[in-house]
Amino acid sequence: MAIAHPAIIDIFSKVQMPYKLSSVVLDIAERALSESGQTSALALQRQIMADRDTLVKMLADPLLTRNRIGAAIGGQSANFVLVPIVTLGERDDVLAKRLTEQLREQHAISIRYVGGQPGCKGCVRITVGTAQELNTLREALRMVLLELD
């Protein structure tokens, strides 16, 4: 805060950053951009990609693929997987919506229905989680998919 003559305030306004950031935010940003912060970020990125590979392999489980989980769509660099839900070889919007609802209501697992997005009919988005979260998801998917038949 400054109290000064309007001419001085005018000069201050010209050199002030357009978006005010608190000292806490600036400290966090400085630590994140430091060498150790960058090292930590890269390690986390590698772990997420490894967990993503685990998720894709888990979704390819024959029990899940027989029960309407399609092959993951898209590249290998995101922290999520886009998965079509299929019935008789066709993407199934109704089932995808029901799956997201059942997982949330019965198992407190939140995946995102994205069927309304262009090119994503019948798809859900599953964010990469920890190994324990992925195991919980696997079991919940098995149970819910069998119930939805």
Image (tube, grey):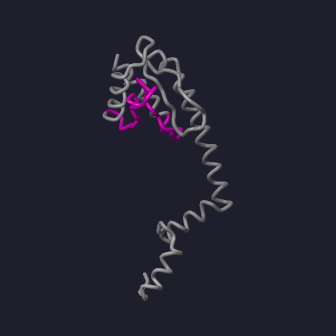
Give the position of the N terminus as an image quadrant.
Answer: bottom left
Residue at x 48%, y 76% (from the top left corner): 13
Q: Residue furthest front?
A: 7
Range of magenta residues: 106-134
Asked if the stretch drawn in magenta spans residue 50, the answer is no
Residue at x 65%, y 62% (from the top left corner): 34
Instruction: Give residue 96's position: percent from left, percent from top.
Output: 38, 25
Seen in the picture, residue 26 relative to 66 is either above or below; the reply is: below
Residue at x 61%, y 45% (from the top left corner): 45
Instruction: Give residue 3's position: percent from left, percent from top.
Output: 41, 86
Q: Residue furthest top?
A: 88
Give the position of the C terminus as an image quadrant.
Answer: top left
Q: How many marks?
A: 0
Quadrant hosting residue 105: top left
Asked if the stretch drawn in magenta spans residue 113, the answer is yes
Between 60 and 37, the residue placed more toward the observer is 37
Instruction: Give residue 25's position: percent from left, percent from top.
Output: 50, 66
Residue at x 49%, y 79% (from the top left corner): 12
